[in-house]
Amino acid sequence: MSDVNMSLGYLMVTRTSENEYVGGIMVTDPYAIPVEFKYSEPIKPTGLQKILYGNSIEKYLLVDVIAKKLLQNIEEKPKFILIEDARLLDIQFKMPIIHISIPTKENEAAKEIKVREELSKESLESGYALVFNGTLTSDDIKWLERISDEIDILEPFHRLKEALSYVCSEE
Amino acid sequence: MFRRIGQYFKDITETIKRERGKLQINSGPIGFKLKTQNFSSANDDIDIKDLQTLRQMFTPIDIQDKIPELVVKGESEYAHSLGVSSATIHFRVVLKRLTEHNLNISIKSCSCGFEEILGFKELEINRFLETKLKETDFVKDEMNELPLKETNEIDNFQLSIQEELFISHKANVNNCQMKTEVMVDDLETEFDQKQKAAFHFENSTGFNAFVESYSPTITVNCNHSLGCVMRFPIKRYKVSKIGYERDELKRALSFILKRYKNAGQLVIVGIYKNVPVDTAERLTFTKNGELFFYLKKGNRKRSILLDVLVVKTKEGRYHVGPIIRKA
């Protein structure tokens, strides 16, 4: 059994149908039981902000505005931060930011990860591909393998996405 | 013929001169002497006499009676009687002085007072020159004999107005708002107003550029709500029974039979790991064998995570038994 004191952080920033950006982070125990959940208010950049930031506005919103704000506000410090969107790998944080995915899927995120050679890559025996920003020890890799064996490690993203949709609908 | 006529008159003239006749012909103009005076009544009305009075005033004189005898001195054989009398016609004009009344003319000069309240405080006027106009009565007996004064007399009259000099005179001025109303004729027409509205920079000489400070930094607020996440079920995989001993599974199945007293045919649904047996509720199973469950609301304590064996009866009811593993 994994260390119950260790936790995982699931970070996600999504774009709604109304072009609003909303982010959330859910900290769970190793068995995907939610411990903490924080979410940002939906942000819709103005026309002037789009002009000023240009093409970088989306990455600016995702990384510098929403993700950093969420990471700074969580009380339960997770051991790792798991992300689905590879653009969040630009986050500079004291904890490793891990992009976890199923390698069989060729998506845009995977193509971008190939370009970014400075990022470290790892794969789990369970089949998950890891691209992370930071340092992961062998123990960390083993711990992640154990977690992925016992739970669906990507499943909390689904809950997180649903929760963000619910929050936006309530706003 | 004319020459002869002219010669004839010339001869007559010479004859008259020769005879030194003293024929005097008064051919002077008739003189009229008319005296006029100003007539005025007390009410400035002029009485106009009727026609009878005027006839008496202008008495006609019979010329036949008063014609002096014509004396022709000297005769000539060629002389002709002239037959023309010259006489002086006199008209007697009697103009009566109708009325003479004394006319009193009273002219008063009054000084007009102006009061002006100023809005200044403690105004001290050190030198104040006041000119006071006194009342002056002018009485004139007869309008007709109103003499015209010489220029120097007029000056003297003006000098008769007294001049008083006040030195260090303090004027107490009340403290009040100065109200000034200026009536200006508005010559601006509606067309001018429309022009100004259309060309609002027409009369502007300076432009005030309003610079709004704009920070491009985007800020976001964070909220927390664990209940939002709790609204969605947690999923568990079905794991293989290979990792469990037979006794462990047998004890879990015995727990189900003993607790629910169900001796009917049971179908094993699956084995699930790390299920919070004390806080989980509303367990749901999919066709793929996945387990979804919710956590009880308000449960803050750490859950007891156990692996469970799930079976299903013929009636479609699910039963869960914990798998207690050996240390």
Image (spheres, coloured by chain):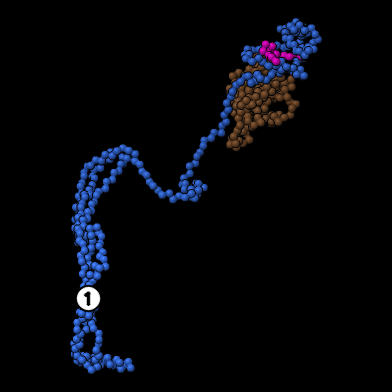
Chain colours: A brown, B blue
| Residue B233 can be seen, yes or no | yes
The answer to whether B238 is drawn above or below residue B91 in the figure is above
| Residue that extends furthest to the front in the rendered view of this protein | B52
> Where residue A17 appears, x then y in whole percent?
66, 31
| Residue A79 can be seen, yes or no | no
Q: Mark 1 lies on which chain?
A: B
> Where residue A19 appears, x then y in whole percent?
64, 32
Q: Which residue is drawn at 23% across and 83% down?
A: B85
Q: Mark 1 points at which residue?
A: B61
> Where residue B131 appears, x then y in whole percent?
23, 48
Name the residue nearer the viewer: B67 or B219: B67
Start and end of the magenta stretch? B270-282
In magenta segment, residue B324: no
Name the residue nearer the viewer: A57 or B120: B120
Name the residue nearer the viewer: B109 or B204: B109
The reply, left or right, for residue B187 in relation to residue B239 is left
| Quadrant where the image shows the N terminus of chain B | bottom left
Answer with the quarter of the image where residue B226 lies.
top right
